[in-house]
Image (spheres, rainbow, N blue to C red):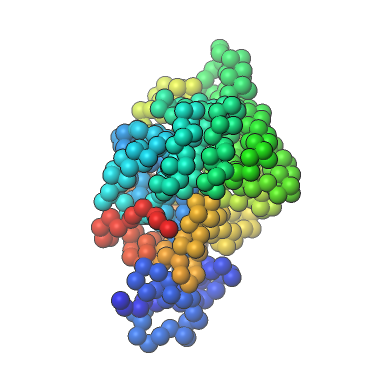
């Protein structure tokens, strides 16, 4: 196998941003060396001043296949991912049919993915009321961890769990050593608020926001932290939206509970005050909250209480967004952003004084660690997969439909001007995205240790 050298004046390595050559042997990084130390037999590719970031790792994606391929699928989701600089996705166990709540469903997913993927992938398993006996079998079959909902998830094939269900499931989860990812909203506060809004104008964003109060997230997080203390499993809070929970999460960390927290680009860029009535493209759950809350989330990232930024890519056919009806009650909740999450994040992070090192930690290293892929994915370092993004952090562009490569080019970011352009993406040493094109065949595969 020939030795290749990827050169750049700005390589994001675990030690910092530096001028370096990344030596690649087959699919893996052999070493990261000084520019003058490239072996003479290496085939050189010089990216000049463009930044070489580790391939992004998205641990929160709804690929929806098999079963809802008309919403999204392996082919379109992994294509969108490659265009966005992602080299690995971990698929959520719901919105696909069957939901990934037993080994047979996991096998069906593997068959569906076969030959379609442009980036690597893996699966989360579901925890639902009737599957405690499946949990350890799913772990043995290769899921990276588990996901549960504390509130109705919006589709019927995946059931929410209550505290009593969790007490049956958690001893099994704890035995696997894998994380449990939790959609943390409790139905009580959501149902109560929705009841009071029965006659409200559901074309207004403020009505939707009021229907999913901070209290729903806060109460759910309190419940999970207490269960984490009882059972000692690895707890991960997905898509944190309310900054009011940061104080308790800080205390939990101080008490050495094994808890990690993610948020999403839309909670870090968008703000409730600016969402127009009828703008259902911005509907997601938990909801996008006020500007002051958004700034507190940024402080949570700065402090390290929030450690991951993932997309929660959750597409649907455009009709389900009820764009004509403009109804926040009946519209599907979900924002798809795989192709543009990096520029969205960089635009916002750069303005607040964060660096590309922070981006690499939030969007690659920590998600890879959550999914147990550290040592293989998430860093530009010897022994890791040769997954890179070639990124121009100074260039600007306007989001147009042709830059969104998921199945339906629907997005609240259309028309927005963003900073930072993904020029190329390499998966295990091979280009999978190159200035708008997708070279080669579908070389993505399921991640195995
Ligand atoms: Zn999700």
Residue at image coords 42%, 54%: 88
The C terminus, quarter of image: bottom left
Q: Residue at x 26, y 51 (%)?
A: 115
Closer to the camera in the image, 310 or 184: 184
Q: Name the foreground residue: 126 vs 431.
A: 126
With 206 as the anchor, is 76 left or right in this view?
left
Q: Nearer the viewer, residue 135 or 295?
A: 135
Quarter occupied by residue 91? top left
Tell me where residue 289 appears, x and y as whole percent. Answer: 61, 35
Above or below 349: residue 24: below
Which residue is found at the position 46% from the left and 32% from the top?
Answer: 131
Q: Position of residue 357 (x, y in %)?
A: 57, 62
Q: Which residue appears farthest toward the top when viewing the image?
A: 199
On screen, 210 above or below 300? above
Q: Is residue 277 visible?
A: no
Where's the N terminus, which quadrant?
bottom left
Q: Residue at the spot x=51%, y=59% of the render?
A: 374
The number of discs equals: 0
65 sits left or right of 34 in the view: left
Relative image position of residue 424 (x, y in whole percent): 38, 62
Residue 237, visible in the rendered structure: yes
Q: Position of residue 30 (x, y in %)?
A: 43, 75
User: Which image quarter: residue 240?
Assistant: top right
Q: Nearer the viewer, residue 64 or 419?
A: 64
As drawn, is 275 to the left or to the right of 281? right
């Amino acid at each position: 196998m020939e030795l290749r050298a990827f050169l750049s004046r700005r390589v994001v390595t675990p030690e910092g941003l530096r001028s370096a050559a990344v030596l690649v042997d087959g699919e893996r990084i052999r070493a990261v060396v000084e520019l003058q130390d490239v072996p003479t037999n290496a085939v050189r590719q010089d990216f000049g001043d463009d930044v070489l970031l580790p391939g992004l790792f998205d641990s929160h994606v709804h690929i929806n296949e098999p079963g809802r391929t008309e919403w999204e699928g392996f082919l379109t989701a992994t294509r969108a991912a490659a265009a966005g600089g992602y080299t690995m996705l971990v698929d959520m166990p719901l919105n696909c049919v069957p939901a990934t709540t037993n080994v047979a469903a996991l096998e069906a997913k593997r068959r569906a993915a076969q030959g379609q993927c442009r980036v690597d992938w893996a699966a989360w398993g579901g925890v639902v009321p009737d599957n405690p006996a499946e949990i350890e079998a799913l772990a043995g079959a290769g899921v990276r961890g588990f996901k549960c909902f504390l509130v109705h998830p919006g589709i019927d094939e995946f059931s929410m769990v209550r505290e009593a269900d969790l007490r049956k499931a958690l001893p099994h989860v704890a035995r696997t050593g894998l994380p449990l990812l939790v959609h943390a909203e409790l139905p009580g506060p959501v149902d109560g608020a929705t009841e009071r809004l029965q006659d409200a104008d559901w074309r207004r964003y403020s009505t939707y926001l009021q229907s999913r109060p901070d209290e729903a997230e806060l109460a759910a997080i309190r419940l999970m932290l207490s269960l984490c203390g009882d059972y000692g499993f690895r707890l991960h809070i997905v898509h944190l939206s309310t900054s009011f929970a940061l104080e308790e999460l800080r205390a939990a960390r101080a008490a050495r509970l094994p808890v990690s927290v993610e948020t999403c680009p839309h909670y870090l860029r968008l703000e409730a005050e600016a969402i127009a009535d009828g703008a259902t493209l911005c509907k997601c759950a938990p909801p996008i909250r006020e500007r002051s809350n958004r700034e507190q989330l940024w402080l949570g990232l700065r402090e390290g209480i929030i450690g991951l930024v993932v997309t929660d890519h959750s597409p649907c056919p455009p009709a389900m967004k009820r764009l004509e009806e403009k109804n926040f009650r009946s519209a599907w909740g979900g924002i798809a952003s795989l192709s543009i999450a990096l520029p969205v994040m960089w635009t916002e992070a750069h303005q607040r004084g964060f660096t590309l090192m922070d981006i690499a930690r939030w969007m690659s290293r920590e998600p890879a660690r959550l999914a147990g892929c550290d040592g293989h994915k998430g860093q530009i370092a010897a022994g890791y997969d040769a997954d890179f993004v070639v990124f121009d952090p100074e260039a600007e562009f306007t989001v147009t439909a042709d830059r969104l490569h998921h199945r339906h080019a629907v997005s609240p970011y259309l028309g927005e001007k963003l900073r930072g352009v993904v020029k190329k993406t390499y998966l295990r040493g091979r280009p999978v995205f190159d200035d708008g094109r997708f070279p080669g065949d579908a070389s993505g595969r399921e991640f195995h240790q």
